Amino acid sequence: MTLQTPEVAHIEQSEKSDLLFELPKEKLIWLLEKMCEIRYFEEKAEDLYIRGLVHGTMHLSIGQEAGSVGSIATLAPEDLIIHHHRGHGHTIAKGADLTLMFAEFLGKESGYCRGRGGSMHIADIPGGNLGATGVVGGGIPTAVGIALALQMRKTHQVLLSYFGDGASNEGEFHESLNMASVWKLPVIFICDNNQYGMSMHVNRAMNIDQISKRAISYGIPGFSVDGNDVLAVYETVEGAVAHARNGHGPSLIDCQSYRWRGHSKSDRNLYRTSEEINDWKTKCPIRRFKAVLVDAKILSKAEVDEIEQKAKEVIDAAAEEAKHLPDPSPENMEDEVYA
Amino acid sequence: MTQSNGREITYLEAIREAMCQEMRMDDEVFLIGEDIGTYGGAFGVSKGMLEEFGPERIRETPISEAAIAGAATGAALMGMRPIMEIMFMDFLTISMNQLVNQAAKMRFMFGGKCSIPMVIRAPSGSGTGAAAQHSQSLEAWFINVPGIKVVAPSSPHDAKGLLITAIRDDNPILFMEHKLLYGLKGAVPDEAFSVPLQSAEVKREGRDLTIVAYSIMVPRALKAAEILSEEGIEIEVVDPRCLKPLDSETIINSVAKTGRVLITHEAPVTGGFGGEIVAVIAASEAFDFLDAPIRRLAGKDIPIPYNRILEQAAVPQVEDVVQAARDLALEGR
């Protein structure tokens, strides 16, 4: 793929993608495994919430699994991500320990953030996940600084900075993309476009049809991609990662998908129809990728079912283990405020 | 205190010297902000630094205060030691999401598994005719945010020593530089030295009354003390230097000694940091030694006006300190 500035490319339909035959079989299996883990993790987390075991709220990305998995699959292990409140998918794709994730949801001392952050703020700093921000767009300026450090230290690492369609209307988005472009920083801005900023549809929130068109004003490459097609996401992000790693600077990727669940647990879905939700459910990224793999005879029906079943078991075991971990103590709670 | 061998430099030069010495010693320290290169910064603090350190480390930005704060926060998260210069403290309002919701929170929110070693240098205060949007003292906003420390030096010596400490500290630190102090001269050691945070200093000893003052109010309090000394009133001036964490002990000891205390700052009185100092004293053993009510002398609850007469009337001047201190020293005698 060649990256053109300032043209905006629209990438879709990878059912016949060369990637199916170029990527090692293990990688294709990994893509399916991770998407299944994310789906079952979030279903399990929702179940724990309904049972009153999870405090507060949570933001589920069910339906958007291809975006996080397809993009993170392009990274080297030492590469980094920074993301947002709907961040379970990125966290799992970046290799988080599922038990420690559940432990954080349950507010446990051994959770990723020792029960201080919860579902909305999971970070795995040694694993290259530099944390989820709960303020819409708040991670984008921080991403500029992370990428600046990578550039100043000449590490050849890259950073994926995730945010939502709503965040792309924040002032911080504009300042950050401009600055990252001026300095040619090694960061890829990925918009997890799930069509709604809480209850407001993108069509009511902006007067353009593709968020990637905003790339033109920063003089960086922009792409809109079918975010329910894991191979299309992979292909798009892979090109942008190479562009950044080679010192050519950032790209903006509009990864178009849909969240099946509400914005958070308080959402009663008053702003959209069940027909719309059901229509998107027919575009399920997991079911779609399973069919692609089977049709291409890369895996048998039995093999994909087994991957799915195994993911379920892994999730159930992690959740069960996390339930029995100890709670934190309020004693010395102030200790972590300052270094 | 480190000996200075009598060399005198300005507050502005002391800040520049602290940055230069730390940048020579540690490659991870860099300065980021608007017009800090050839222009030398709006107040000339970074003049000449571009020539020595180059554009990578004297990193000029577009006018984007949120992204500047984010760039500093993210680089600090990666272990670098950015010094962020905001052109006027007032513009930190545009950076607040990064500073308050990101920089101050990340360590705690992520379970203590990261740190954010950054300095936010902020020219603050009134007296330059810059009116309401370029004259504020917003320390109280930051003091009320756990995760941020706040420093407000009043002399060239303290500016250098505290800035070096702040750069070496592993937390986000707001470093307030009063614009009217930039030209103040004083003795400053040549070498890199550090003044510890949470170390108030008794700037003048006295038996009759304690004035707790910081930033620009310290020279004003010292001048007032000089004037009142001629009237036989001996004033002790305590400068907290670092507002958070606060060295309450030095303040409490002084008040226990004098039995009277006036707290003064330029920021508006309501919700200002003076109220916190009042509470610290009132809840301490010094309360039993008080011979008069605790008094505050702070900025009026108004935006800073433009006109020179109005501007001076908006915040405490030397004569206001003299009058308030005299009244309090004589109260009930």
Image (cartoon, rainbow, N blue to C red):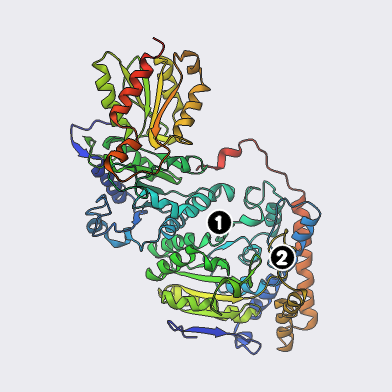
Which circle marks residue A262 in the picture?
2
- Residue B323 position within the rendered picture, expressed as x and y whole percent measured from the top left: 32, 23
Disc 2 secondary structure class:
loop
Q: The residue under label 2 is which amino acid type?
A: Gly
Q: Which one is nearer the viewer's eye here, A101 or B180?
A: B180
- Residue B11 position within the rendered picture, expressed as x and y whole percent measured from the top left: 26, 40
Quadrant of the rendered image containing residue A210: bottom right
Q: The residue under label 1 is which amino acid type?
A: Ile
Q: Nearer the viewer, mark 2 or mark 1?
A: 2
Disc 1 secondary structure class:
helix
- Residue B257 position within the rendered picture, expressed as x and y whole percent measured from the top left: 40, 15
Q: Report the chain holding disc 2.
A: A
Whether residue B230 appears in this view of the structure is yes
Q: Which one is nearer the viewer's eye here, B54 or B254?
A: B254
Q: Which one is nearer the viewer's eye here, B301 or A112?
A: B301
Quadrant of the rendered image containing residue A180: bottom left
- Give the side of residue B43 with respect to residue A263, left or right: left
Which circle marks residue A125 in the picture?
1
Q: CA distance from mark 2 to mark 1?
A: 29 Å
- Give the side of residue B134 with respect to residue B282, left or right: left
